[in-house]
């Protein structure tokens, strides 16, 4: 049995660790079907000779592939491509939130939940952040070190609005992948996507106004709405296709809505991805009602399929879409580098940015700009997407294996999250409390709604960490706790 080795892989092989290069070639062969489920892989010694690497490097590569759920080790037999024979749980149904707008009071609950997650000894299945080992940490630090040598004075100065010119130029180039044709001057850099969304809400709404959002919705969005004295109108959401256009259209005819805030690509927490035809319909519908769309595209680069979803901004002809995103889910959460392309609201957003935080931190912007310019980002994304897809699949398998009968789970086509719907009698706040006692954190359903009694039987799982025996044990424990609450 021979492995197919991509020529393009050889051209960039020196960029990754040696064991990662070996693992990636095997992963590509598995993905292409060259290696089928159940196939035996070469012995450690055979692969060592074939790849001209040490035995320890091969062992590391096999351990890496096993952590991704791609292969399994059989005692006294060898390494095999993992079989995918498993039950598939049903998906959650379309959400049915209340049809009236409400004030938001979620911050207290979010704070209490997240205070409990601070212990470093926790198995963190709640926070939606990628594991450091999935990120190009060394490459980013090299860029930081180069900046400190080459541009010392520039690095310690305030950056000028609208933000790092080199980064905005790279964003303009990448906008073609989103289906857009944006210029560098269309962007303003921000402290993560959270600040971008906060500024957009400030730009388009006043206290007391209503913002239409998906249901369930990311709790950070709810906290921004709460902080600004706005009201939330939750729109039903399909776990596959996102916000229901019929429900939104009905809401627009019944009441004044200041803006719609949506995550069309792999939404948080359900992972839905709105098809292009719905994105076009959404933009056209809001244009007809003169209602701006705040588009959170933070997960857009984390698609599992061959092509990146087009952003809603790609269908915008009037500057009515305010596109927000960041590099927190793909490169460096701690850098807090985000951006917004606010369309016709650009001047207002720039003024608000200056009055809120003046400018974005200089050094992280320039480090990410250099990383993008040097061509490392796309290579990193290919590896990250493959690993996240494997981890999402492995976590879904664990839910099917360990959780009580009647449990449902989403099937996202991108991102790093699963939304788990438990039998009705299981209270996710009680489950979260029991899980914390066992050293496991989850994100319980009620923090994803403006109404505290919603989604009591649901919770969000983070799949951003490689599969390990520790995570497997945590999932087994979590499933047992859920069963005990039935």
Image: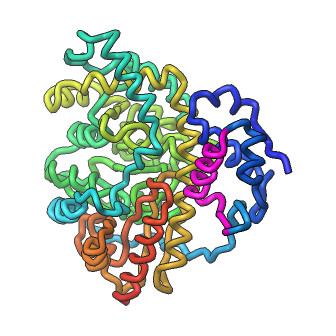
Q: Is residue 69 above or below residue 366?
A: below
Stretch in magenta:
54-75
Report x, y in % for residue 315.
51, 37
Report x, y in % for residue 163.
30, 21
**Would residue 185 be counted in the magenta stretch?**
no
Q: Quadrant of residue 429?
A: bottom left
Q: Is residue 102 above or below residue 315?
A: below
Q: Nearer the viewer, residue 116 or 469?
A: 469
The residue drawn where x is 36% and y is 25% is: 187
Residue 297 seen? no
The residue drawn where x is 49% and y is 76% is: 408
Q: Is residue 146 above or below residue 70?
A: above
Q: Nearer the viewer, residue 472 or 406?
A: 472
The residue drawn where x is 37% and y is 90% is: 486
**Would residue 71 be counted in the magenta stretch?**
yes
Taking the image as shown, residue 306 lies to the left or right of residue 207, namely right
Q: Nearer the viewer, residue 225 or 218?
A: 218
- Considering every residue shown, the one lying at the far right of the view is 1
Q: Is residue 267 above or below residue 151?
A: below
Q: How is the image coloured?
A: rainbow
Report x, y in % for residue 246.
46, 62
Total numbered labels placed on residues in the image: 0
Taking the image as shown, residue 291 lies to the left or right of residue 203, namely right
Report x, y in % for residue 287.
41, 42
């Amino acid at each position: 049995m021979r492995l197919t080795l991509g020529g393009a892989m050889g051209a960039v092989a020196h960029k990754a660790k040696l064991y990662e290069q070996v693992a990636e070639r095997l992963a590509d062969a598995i993905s292409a079907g060259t290696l089928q489920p159940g196939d035996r892989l070469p012995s450690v010694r055979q692969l060592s000779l074939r790849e001209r690497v040490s035995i320890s490097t091969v062992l590391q590569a096999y351990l890496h592939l096993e952590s991704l759920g791609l292969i399994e080790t059989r005692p006294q037999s060898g390494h095999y491509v993992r079989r995918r024979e498993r039950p598939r749980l049903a998906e959650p149904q379309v959400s049915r939130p209340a049809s009236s707008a409400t004030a938001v009071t979620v911050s207290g609950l979010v704070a209490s939940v997240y205070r409990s997650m601070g212990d470093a000894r926790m198995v963190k299945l709640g926070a939606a952040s990628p594991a450091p080992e999935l990120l190009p940490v060394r490459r980013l630090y090299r860029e930081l070190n180069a900046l400190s040598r080459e541009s010392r004075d520039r690095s310690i100065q305030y950056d000028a609005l609208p933000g790092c010119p080199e980064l905005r130029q790279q964003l303009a180039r990448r906008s073609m992948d989103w289906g857009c044709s944006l210029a560098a001057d269309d962007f303003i850099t921000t402290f993560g996507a959270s600040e971008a969304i906060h500024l957009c809400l400030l730009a388009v709404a006043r206290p007391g106004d209503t913002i239409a959002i998906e249901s369930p919705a990311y709790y950070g969005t709810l906290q921004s709405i709460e902080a600004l004295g706005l009201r939330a109108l939750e729109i039903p959401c399909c776990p596959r296709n996102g916000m229901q256009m019929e429900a939104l259209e009905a809401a627009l005819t019944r009441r004044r809505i200041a803006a719609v805030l949506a995550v069309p690509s792999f939404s948080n927490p359900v992972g839905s991805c709105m098809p292009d035809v719905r994105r076009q319909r959404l933009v056209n519908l809001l244009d007809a009602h003169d209602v701006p769309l705040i588009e959170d595209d933070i997960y857009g680069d984390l698609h599992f399929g061959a092509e990146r979803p087009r952003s809603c901004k790609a269908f915008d002809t009037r500057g009515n879409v305010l596109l927000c995103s960041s590099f927190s889910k793909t490169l460096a959460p701690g850098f807090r580098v985000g951006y917004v392309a606010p369309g016709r609201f650009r001047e207002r957003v720039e003024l608000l940015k200056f009055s809120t935080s003046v400018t974005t931190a200089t050094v992280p912007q320039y480090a990410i700009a250099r990383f993008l310019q040097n061509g490392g980002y796309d290579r990193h994304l290919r590896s990250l997407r493959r690993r996240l897809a494997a981890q999402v699949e492995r976590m879904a398998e664990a839910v099917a294996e360990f959780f009580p009968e009647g449990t449902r789970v989403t099937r996202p086509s991108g991102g790093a999250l699963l939304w788990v719907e438990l039998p009705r009698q299981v209270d996710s706040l009680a489950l979260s409390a029991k899980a914390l006692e066992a050293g496991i954190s989850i994100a319980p359903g009620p923090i994803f709604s403006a109404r505290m009694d919603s989604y009591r039987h649901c919770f969000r799982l983070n799949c951003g960490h490689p599969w390990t025996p520790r995570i497997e044990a945590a999932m087994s424990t979590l499933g047992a706790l859920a069963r005990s609450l039935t």
